[in-house]
Amino acid sequence: MKRLFFLIIFLVPFFNWGQKIDKVHIEEYDLPNGLHVILHKDVNEPNVIVGTKYHVGSKNEDAGKTGFAHFFEHLLFHGTKNIPQGELENIIFNAGGYCNAYTNYDVTYYYQLLPAHEYKLGLWVESERMLHPIITQKGIDREREIVKEEKRMRYDNKPLGNSYFYLMSKLFTNDTYGHNMIGSMEDLDRASVGDFEAFFKKFYVPNNACLVVSGNIDIEDTKKWVGLYFTDIPRGEKIKRPKKIKKTSGLDHYTEMDVKGLRNQSIEIGYPIMSQSSADAPVMQIITSILSGNSDFSYFDNNLKAEQDTVIKRLNASSSFWEKVGTLSVKAEITTKESEAYTLQRIEEQLELLKTKSVDPMVLERVKKQYISTYIDIFYDAQTFADKVTDYYHLHKNTSDIKSLISDIEKVTSSDIQRVAKKYLNINNRIVISYHPE
């Protein structure tokens, strides 16, 4: 009886998850000015998310004008013709809400979490941000100093705070994914009001944006107010996007750096991999977890036993997926510079296992379950869903592909893992960055 009870408990969640995903209703359409609208009704959500995701990130910046996308993340909170400077956040807070934004290589996202009955306030704020921003020299000067302090605190003052961006600079050209998302402070210092106005006019337009309203909403009523607030905003010019992203001409396979404040010798290994919309991306997610996931089964923990190794003090793998590219990174903290060759050899041995030996079915199943339990949460949380579904609109082929998040993971086989590991984790594509304590 106990065994039967366990099986019932084990299977019920999967049944419920499938039901929940099948019932997710996304209504999407375009306004005449090109603004894409996604409406998602969830009667179990007491709040509403109203957000606008623009298809512009740091990879869209021109050489000599980096940092603009992140800068606008700050600048578009300043105020508009109808929202006094510094009052935008207060208006949202006073309505019982919260607002924020983020920028990455590919997109910039502004959003408000509000009580469901205040969704019209969120629509008004987003329409104001798109139609009536105030871009002044005073506002630029103020935000420039804030961005400089952010860069110092988040990146420059940490010994390896810029390591990911340095790795990207070794893999991709500086005019796309090869420069820091926050940009060059020298570029921002040189930029004029006209430069910022031109960047806004090009990218922060309805036909480069996706508006999302997710939560306990009335679909038809929301459509009416979306039309009232956004239909009259002028369409921008068509944006030309590169079809392919250039990699650096000839990989610099080995680089050494002295780092102030670094306590231990460290190395980082990087591989260029697939984009987030590639069919191989779920396989690489599984690979990353097999290498460096749960300590009960990860290859690094079980085969290298870093806690017992006198050479390798710490070891982990992580993968990042972007619109056009991706990276697998392996970071190791080691005892001495002379330990590098040994460490690289041991890491390569684990990658060879992925290429030549089938993964234990129980391990593969456990990794899948971890991803499934994480992904199902997306469909139960309006805030997370709004963020994810707008990514799917901008960065994937079809918005509805979001419903395949779980099935794509479930389909991964051991032979897929071997195939993808052989294709992408080639030692000839590998770069190694060696960081020495200064």
Image (cartoon, rainbow, N blue to C red):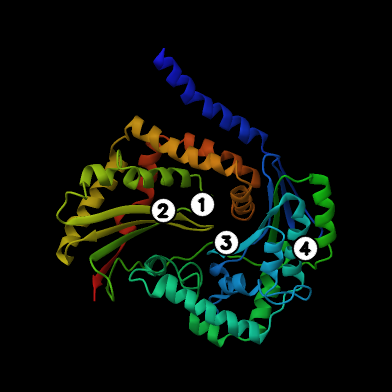
First in residue order: circle 2 vs circle 1: 1
- The answer to whether one can see residue 165 in this image is yes
Which quadrant is home to the N terminus? top left
Q: CA distance from mark 2 to mark 4?
A: 38 Å
Q: Amino acid at mark 2?
A: Ser
Residue 268 to residue 192: above or below: above
Q: Earlier in the sequence, mark 2 or mark 4?
A: 4
Residue ID for mark 3: 243
Counting from the top left corner in percent of width and height, residue 165 is at 42, 68
Chain-order first, disc 4 or disc 1: 4
Q: How far apart are the alpha carbons under marks 1 and 3?
A: 15 Å
> What is the C-alpha distance between the residues marked 3 and 4?
35 Å
Q: Is residue 77 above or below residue 31?
A: below
Q: Assess whether mark 1 and mark 2 are in contact (beta carbons under 8 angstroms).
A: no
From the image, tell me which residue sits under label 4.
Answer: 124
Give x and y (percent) for residue 260: 28, 76
Q: Position of residue 110 (x, y in %)?
A: 64, 62
Q: Is residue 37 left or right of residue 307?
A: right
Question: Pointer 1: what residue?
Answer: 276
